[in-house]
Image (spheres, helix red, strand yellow):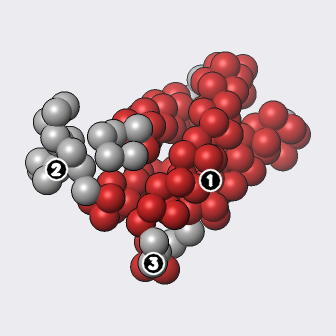
Amino acid sequence: MPDANDRPAATDRVEPTDRVEAIDRQVAHLWMVRTFLKHADEAEDDEELRSVVRDIYDFILAVGPIDQVQDDAGYLKMAKKKLSKLRKATELYEEIQPEVSGHTNFVMAAKSLRLALDRITELVNSPGS
């Protein structure tokens, strides 16, 4: 069972339902980053930034709302399938972020996106997957 920091011990097997719930918590962060970037003036003229926004949304849409999850294994399979697209979006945003804007909001969006990706990756690849 995950501790208060949402982190099980490295050797613990995390139940599928717990993994789904933990991924959903990270999806909330993805949603906020996506919303920020989507509504940023900088996105109007930057196709790469808009592609990051689309790819984040693609991951969110693929896993769907947690209250509609009826199959934990199916949710985890879809998250794993879409993970590479989320990884590429994260890497692209980290690469272009300094050119897009050095404002703290954009820097923090990059950090938040990376943290969410890393945690989702751990959860998708944790024992029992």
* Disc nearer the start of the sequence (3/1): 1
In the structure shown, which secondary structural element does the residue marked by tag 3 occupy?
loop
- Name the element at disc 2: loop
Q: Which label sits on residue 2?
A: 2
Q: In the rendering, which numbered label is found on residue 70? A: 3
* Residue 5 to residue 103: above or below: below
CA–CA distance in space, label 3 to label 2: 21 Å
Q: Position of residue 106 (x, y in %)?
A: 57, 34
x, y (%) of residue 28? 44, 58
The CA distance from mark 3 to mark 1 is 18 Å
* Residue 80 shows in this picture: yes
Please give left or right for residue 52 compared with residue 109 in the image. Answer: right
Could you say which quadrant of the image residue 7 lies in?
Answer: top left
Between 50 and 107, which is closer to the camera in this rendering? Answer: 50
Q: Residue at 39% of width from left, 46% of height from top?
A: 129
Residue type, numbered disc 1: Phe
Which residue occupies the foreground of this view, 47 or 58?
Answer: 58
